[in-house]
């Protein structure tokens, strides 16, 4: 949608309300309640059987989605704009059982002019179950509803 303020066009970016991981209006999604501290983003949740892979185990792709969303949310909150995931690496150390409380925390690890690297730990039962590392492209403009991004060389 485009609105005009009389001097220049302002692009209104569609809401994130339907997002699978953080959208409050997506009844099939995770509905992450992401909280922010000074340098971190944090969420806590418990997942049911519809998010499992093997019987009783939370699907690894769901864990990756939680980590990606948490890190992206932190990058957006700290730098603004429209960050896009350029790379995501996950390491799975222990399974997470359906019904166990999951606690995830993300931190910014480094920045360049066009990119931000972030790390995430996913814990359950007091143990690190997965770690993630991601590189985000810092995109600062939206033209005609499309995100304009110039990847790092």
Image: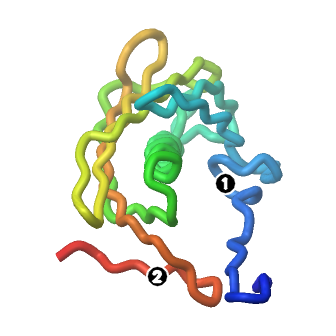
Residue at the (68%, 72%) spot, across then down: 13
- Looking at marks 1 and 2 on the same chain, the residue that comes earlier in the sequence is marked by 1
Q: Residues within 10 Å of mark 2 (few under 14, many from 20)?
A: some
Residue at the (71%, 42%) spot, across then down: 31
Q: Secondary structure at mark 2?
A: strand
Q: Is residue 13 left or right of residue 24?
A: left
Query: In this rendering, is residue 81 above or below 150?
Result: above
Q: Nearer the viewer, mark 1 or mark 2?
A: 2
In this rendering, the count of numbered labels is 2
Q: Residue furthest left?
A: 153
Residue 144 image-quadrant placement: bottom right
Q: CA distance from mark 1 to mark 2?
A: 23 Å
Residue at the (30%, 28%) spot, across then down: 93
Residue 133 image-quadrant placement: top left
Quadrant of the snapshot with the C terminus: bottom left
Quadrant of the snapshot with the N terminus: bottom right
Q: Which residue is mark 2?
A: 148
Query: In this rendering, is residue 19 above or below 141?
Result: above
User: Residue 33: image x %, image y %?
Assistant: 67, 34
**Camera sees residue 64:** no
User: Residue 80: image x %, image y %?
Assistant: 50, 57
Residue 17 image-quadrant placement: bottom right
Q: Secondary structure at mark 1?
A: loop
Q: Is residue 5 left or right of residue 102?
A: right
Residue at the (50%, 42%) spot, across then down: 70
Query: In this rendering, is residue 23 above or below 146?
Result: above
Q: Which residue is mark 1?
A: 20
User: Residue 36: image x %, image y %?
Assistant: 55, 31
**Camera sees residue 80:** yes
């Amino acid at each position: 949608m485009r609105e005009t303020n009389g001097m220049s066009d302002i692009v209104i970016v569609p809401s994130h309300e339907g997002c699978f991981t953080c959208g409050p209006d997506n009844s099939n999604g995770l509905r992450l309640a992401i909280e922010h501290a000074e340098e971190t983003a944090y969420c806590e949740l418990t997942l049911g059987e519809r998010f499992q892979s093997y019987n009783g185990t939370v699907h690894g792709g769901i864990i990756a989605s939680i980590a990606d969303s948490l890190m992206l949310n932190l990058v957006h909150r700290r730098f603004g704009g429209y960050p896009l995931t350029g790379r995501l690496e996950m390491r799975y150390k222990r399974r997470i059982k359906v019904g166990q409380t999951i606690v995830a925390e993300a931190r910014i690890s480094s920045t360049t002019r066009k990119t931000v690297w972030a790390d995430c730990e996913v814990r359950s039962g007091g143990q690190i179950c997965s770690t993630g590392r991601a590189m985000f492209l810092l995109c600062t403009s939206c033209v005609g509803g499309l995100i304009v991004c110039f990847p790092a060389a």
